[in-house]
Image (cartoon, rainbow, N blue to C red):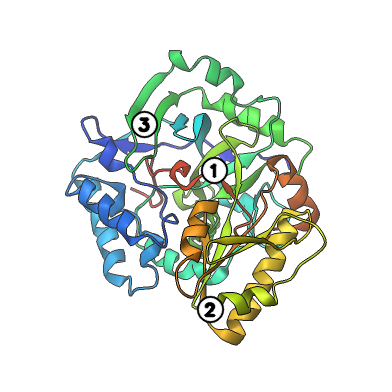
Amino acid sequence: MNDCCVRIPEILLPKEGTDLCRWAVIACDQHTSDPAYWEELGRFVGRAPSTLRLTLPEIFLTEDCAGRIAAIHRAMNEYLRGGIFRRLPAGAVLVERKTPFSPARFGLVISVDLEAYSYEAGARAQILASEATIVERIPPRLKIREGAPLEFPHVMLLYDDREDRVLGKLKASRASLEKLYDFTLNMGGGNVRGYFVPAAEEIVSAFASLADGQGTLFLVGDGNHSLATAKAYWEKVKAGLPEEERALHPARFALAEAVNLYDEGIRFEAIHRVVTGVDPEKFAASFPREGEGEAYLVVRGQKCAAPLGRDAASAVRKTDEYIAAYLLENGGGVDYIHGEEEVRRLSLQDGCVGVLLPRMEKSALFAAVEKHGCLPRKTFSMGESAEKRYYMEGKEIVHG
């Protein structure tokens, strides 16, 4: 591949004086079973400018979202007219994130060419989904993007850079960079700092060098369905454009934070399953088992071994296949949970049973996708829920 997919954006940030602790909120795909979290966050944000007004928490996707989507579009346009934003010169943002679980994680906010991204199974591209994409989840997200002049990403792209060639020097010299923000994130999200990186052409060259000789530069670590929605939107926009207008249209490029797979702040955690509305003992009785492995059933708060082999992706696949077949025959629902203690707690509720799944080694990720294609959905999580990306930087996706 001769052309690197990395592009240098003109990023939008809230103007100076904005309460950033209220501006930045956690990724919309978190706390999908915890309405109290979003209620508390809403009370904290109040009427202050906030990305809470510009995104749709997935907990509400089961409702009729037309009113919420219209409100998002209104808020974006009001923020644009009201001078909420300042536009940075072309450049990247070096992000330093500290959480209660990790002393530091570094990433770089860039934009990437959606023409170089695919979520199709078996595809070859510079940017690939790390897990299976549920295409049925795209349409409600697409409705938001179709009327939105702006995007705010929680997408995190992983790249394989064991020697830290892309960010090593930048991290070491960050004290000499312009600090854009430094504040405490709400709801226990830790602290985040952002530094402006004006010499961004060097960044593109570094990524291009990293990509040289390997087909895939990025795997989507978080926000796969958001990036898939951006791709679907671009395909619709592109279809109505003359060829000469496609190369530089802002919808072609999506904002994301690129993070080195080997960053010390990147820890892969298992994503467990909690099945609801079922007979726990009946569910457990036919659960598949093999001779070894570290998967566990959790019935009424108690763990019992349910070995599914040594391969984490295979264990997830077998679990999901069983759950899907069981629910089809018996009814019920499934949710995806971080943390063993939370699974134990939920399993004490009537009609609930948990499945604790093994953790995937992060060093195996690129090889696993290369060998097997997309992994099963929710095979791994990058850290705890509170460590997920908060919405901060934005970019225009329509011509201003």
Residue drawn at x 58%, y 39% is 6
Q: Which residue is mark 2?
A: 278
Q: What numbered label is drawn on residue 334?
A: none
| Circle 2: element type | loop
Are circles 1 and 2 on residues that touch, CB within 8 Å? no
Q: Which residue is mark 1?
A: 383
Q: CA distance from mark 1 to mark 2?
A: 29 Å
Q: Which residue is mark 3?
A: 88
Amino acid on which disc 2 is placed: Val
Are circles 2 and 3 on residues that touch, CB within 8 Å? no
Residue 260, position as x, y percentages in the image = 62, 34
Observer-nearest residue: 337 or 237? 337
Residue 364, position as x, y percentages in the image = 74, 44
Question: Foreground mark, 2 or 3?
Answer: 2
For the residue carrying disc 1, how many other residues have a C-alpha within 10 Å: few (<14), some (14-19), or many (20+)? some
Residue drawn at x 42%, y 61% is 32
Horizontal relation, residue 257 to residue 316: left or right: left
